[in-house]
């Protein structure tokens, strides 16, 4: 294995020498020089953010009251598609506009700023950007408002095409709970490209001052190695390759800024396996400024049976894999939460309860509160071994550990996200947070409110709007290395080059056995396995990774 790893490094160096860069007048934030040390967000900081989940794509588990209104409650609606089918266009638009207007407000951004976050991730469906079919459009003025708020409060934005035409994972989070049909009809790929092109053009307009630093091509796609109903890996890879070209062809780079970072989701494969993708000439080898998104949850598949220590150790178990992958490309943990069970996530389990009752169930015990803080702190530490983290999600009506706002109000998440109560050892596969040895001593443990707190103790009175230059402190000297051959990867008007992957041929060679839920290898045995082997080594030695992957799978089944 050591030889293989050093080969990988040598290849990475060689490949980086071959990179052709676009002119990069640069902010440091959200920019990784080809072959350079992966960056996080602002000025090389780590990505520290929150998802605006449930806003432009409804998810009933986060906002049950919305689905319990008289007009819809008898339909037991599971997703946005059905919501609009049941209500009809006008009824749906009226309700959704109210939701778009009220679910996310300027005060949310003030709270993010007060808690020193630097990023919001905004999930959106394809229907906001191209023919909406049964869905409803009208999101863009609200998106625009959020981009402005982000700019004013010093946050960077990742916009994510969370739901693809036909659907990439079959879950409510793609807009429609049902089959996975993205791969079933080639018009879906074309429509996805239209959506991506339109989205890219819109969010990179001058008026947004470059606040959108990254575009994610899609969320949690299922491939065959992960789920028998998923798509062939090469269907996904083809989408990623073409999607990258469409983003590059349609982005507008404002003066003094970088090209946007293109983010792809790991499809529940071990992050370091994606070296394969970025080492392949027909796949991602020519990409510049890109990152991998991985989602880590420890709440499903029997996680509720774990002890506090086992939850913490599950997160410790990710350190090695994230550090390995981060050597090669930025790895952003684009979703995680403090939830350790499905209590109130399966929202009917909390039917009739109030936020006060649900939160009191946790806040009644100091030990439980303290665990929440520990679970936060271990995740913050481990995920910053990668490029950083983005909490899922900003609000949840009942389940406090899934709500950033509630978790902040309860002081499970500290105002300073880097605040450390316990020492952290990045090399330890268990007990990586040393609970026996608090940095400030046992007498200085955090204080937790002993009541359900509807955000009121987040004081935003001192948070003020900032102007663009002040926030971003643009640094045009940072990466002015323009070997400037911008023709290399920016495709021709959205017309993606054929990557000539013969999916049927490759599928039959595919080495991964479809073991539902586990992070198996997806790389076919083509003898190009230098990247993959390193990942397999890590994978093989880490059973907690498998456990975590199982959990990821279970989560996807719910969210
Ligand atoms: C957050 O608000 C508190 C209370 O107003 C204030 O003391 C603190 O400085 C604020 N922090 C930031 C980063 O704005
Ligand atoms: C593309 O986006 C623009 C707004 O930038 C919108 O006017 C147009 O309708 C969109 N196209 C489709 C097909 O939705
Ligand atoms: C966002 O800010 C831009 C630039 O200041 C402005 O043109 C636009 O009207 C604003 N949009 C909204 C919805 O506030
Ligand atoms: C693909 O989708 C289009 C548009 O929905 C439809 O007209 C066409 O019949 C579909 N083709 C197949 C093979 O399902
Ligand atoms: C990457 O660049 C190489 C060399 O220019 C070229 O042969 C290859 O086709 C490119 N790959 C893609 C997917 O564009
Ligand atoms: C408290 O939470 C647990 C899950 O952690 C749940 O099983 C239990 O029913 C809850 N109790 C009350 C009174 O809500
Ligand atoms: C972790 O391991 C690396 C490499 O073995 C070593 O350099 C580093 O000092 C270790 N860190 C801690 C905190 O033990
Ligand atoms: C700008 O970039 C240069 C070169 O990387 C660095 O030395 C300098 O500290 C940066 N300035 C600011 C304000 O970030
Ligand atoms: C720019 O490129 C030159 C030669 O390719 C290299 O030596 C130098 O380190 C690069 N500078 C930056 C800031 O990337
Ligand atoms: C896209 O490719 C097709 C087939 O290769 C070609 O006919 C068409 O003109 C191209 N479109 C653009 C915009 O380059
Ligand atoms: C793709 O691979 C299959 C199976 O090996 C083969 O039958 C087919 O001819 C190939 N198609 C192309 C276009 O190469």
Image (cartoon, helix red, strand yellow):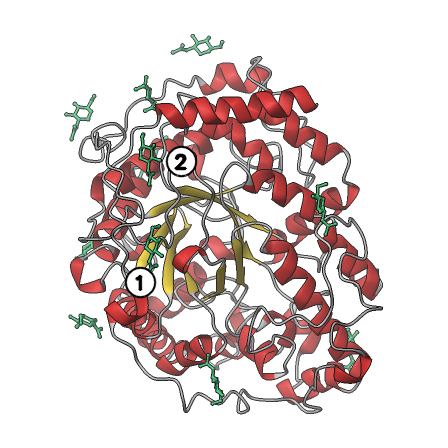
Determine whether the beta carbon of the residue marked 1 sits less than 8 angstroms from the nearest atom of ligand 2: no
Residue 122 x %, y %: 40, 61
Which residue is located at x 74 percent, y 68 percent?
Answer: 422
Quadrant in the picture for the N terminus: top right
Which residue is located at x 27 percent, y 38 percent?
Answer: 481
Residue 123 seen in this snapshot: no
Which residue is located at x 72 percent, y 65 percent?
Answer: 340
Asked whether, in this view, residue 143 is left or right of residue 281, the answer is left
Compared with 243, 344 (above or below) is below
Residue at the spot of label 1:
136
Residue 217 x %, y %: 39, 45
- Marking on residue 126: none
Determine whether the beta carbon of the residue marked 2 sits less than 8 angstroms from the nearest atom of ligand 5: no
- For the residues labelled 2 and 1, the Cα–Cα distance comes to 26 Å
Q: Label 2: state its secondary structure.
A: helix
Residue 366 x %, y %: 79, 83
Q: Nearer the viewer, residue 449 or 451?
A: 449
Q: Label 1: state its secondary structure.
A: loop
Mark 2 Cα-neighbour bin, 10 Å: few <14, some 14–19, many ≥20 = many
Asked whether, in this view, residue 19 is left or right of residue 25, the answer is right
Q: Nearer the viewer, residue 35 or 161?
A: 35
First-in-chain label (2 vs 1): 1
Mark 1 Cα-neighbour bin, 10 Å: few <14, some 14–19, many ≥20 = many
Quadrant in the picture for the C terminus: bottom right
Residue at the spot of label 2:
240
Q: Nearer the viewer, residue 86 or 352?
A: 352
Asked whether, in this view, residue 550 is left or right of residue 81, the answer is right
Dividing the picture into quadrants, the one containing residue 461 is bottom left
Callout count:
2
């Amino acid at each position: 294995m050591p030889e293989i790893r050093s080969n990988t490094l040598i290849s990475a160096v060689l490949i980086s020498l071959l990179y052709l860069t676009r002119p990069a007048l640069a902010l440091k934030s959200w920019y990784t020089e080809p072959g350079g040390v992966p960056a996080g967000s602002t000025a090389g900081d780590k990505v520290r953010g929150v998802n605006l989940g449930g806003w432009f794509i409804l998810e009933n588990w986060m906002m049950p009251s919305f689905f319990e209104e008289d007009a819809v409650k008898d339909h037991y609606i599971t997703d946005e598609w059905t919501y609009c089918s049941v209500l009809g266009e006008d009824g749906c638009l009226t309700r959704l506009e109210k939701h778009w207007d009220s679910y996310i407000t300027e005060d949310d951004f003030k709270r993010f700023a007060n808690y020193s976050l630097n990023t919001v991730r905004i999930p959106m469906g394809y229907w906001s950007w191209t023919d909406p079919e049964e869905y409803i459009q009208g999101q863009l003025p609200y998106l625009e408002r959020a981009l402005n708020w982000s700019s004013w409060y010093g946050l960077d934005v990742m916009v994510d095409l969370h739901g693809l035409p036909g659907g990439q994972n079959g879950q409510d989070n793609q807009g429609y709970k049902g089959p996975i049909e993205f791969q079933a009809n080639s018009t879906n790929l074309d429509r996805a490209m239209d959506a991506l092109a339109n989205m890219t053009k819109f969010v990179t307009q001058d008026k947004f001052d470059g606040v959108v630093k990254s575009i994610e091509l899609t969320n949690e796609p299922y491939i065959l190695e992960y789920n028998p109903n998923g798509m062939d890996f090469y269907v996904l890879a083809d989408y990623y390759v073409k999607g990258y070209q469409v983003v590059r062809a349609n982005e507008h780079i404002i003066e003094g800024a970088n090209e946007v970072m293109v983010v792809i989701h790991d499809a529940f494969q071990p992050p370091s396996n994606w070296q394969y993708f970025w080492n392949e000439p027909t796949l991602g080898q020519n990409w510049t400024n890109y990152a991998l998104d991985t989602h880590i949850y420890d709440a499903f598949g029997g996680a509720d049976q774990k002890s506090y220590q086992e939850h913490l150790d599950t997160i410790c178990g990710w350190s090695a894999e994230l550090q390995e992958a981060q050597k090669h490309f930025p790895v952003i943990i684009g979703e995680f939460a403090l939830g350790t069970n499905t209590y109130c996530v399966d929202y009917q389990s909390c039917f009739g309860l109030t936020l006060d009752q649900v939160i009191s169930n946790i806040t009644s015990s100091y030990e439980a509160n303290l665990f929440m803080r520990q679970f936060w702190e271990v995740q913050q530490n481990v995920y910053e071994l990668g490029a950083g983290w983005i909490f899922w999600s900003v609000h949840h009506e009942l389940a406090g550990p899934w709500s950033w706002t509630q978790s902040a109000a309860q002081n499970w998440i500290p105002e300073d996200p880097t605040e450390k109560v316990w020492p952290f050892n990045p090399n330890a596969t268990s007990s990586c947070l040393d609970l026996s040895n608090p940095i400030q001593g046992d007498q200085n443990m955090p204080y937790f409110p002993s009541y359900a707190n509807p955000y009121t103790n987040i004081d935003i009175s001192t948070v003020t709007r900032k102007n663009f230059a002040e926030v971003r402190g643009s640094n045009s000297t940072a990466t002015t290395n323009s070997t400037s051959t911008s023709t290399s990867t920016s495709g021709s008007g959205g017309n993606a080059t054929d990557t000539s992957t013969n999916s049927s041929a490759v599928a039959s060679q595919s080495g991964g056995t479809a073991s539902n839920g586990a992070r198996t290898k997806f790389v076919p045995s083509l003898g190009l396995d230098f990247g993959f082997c390193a990942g397999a080594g890590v994978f093989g030695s880490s059973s907690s990774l498998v456990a975590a992957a199982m959990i990821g799978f279970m989560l996807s089944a719910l969210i």
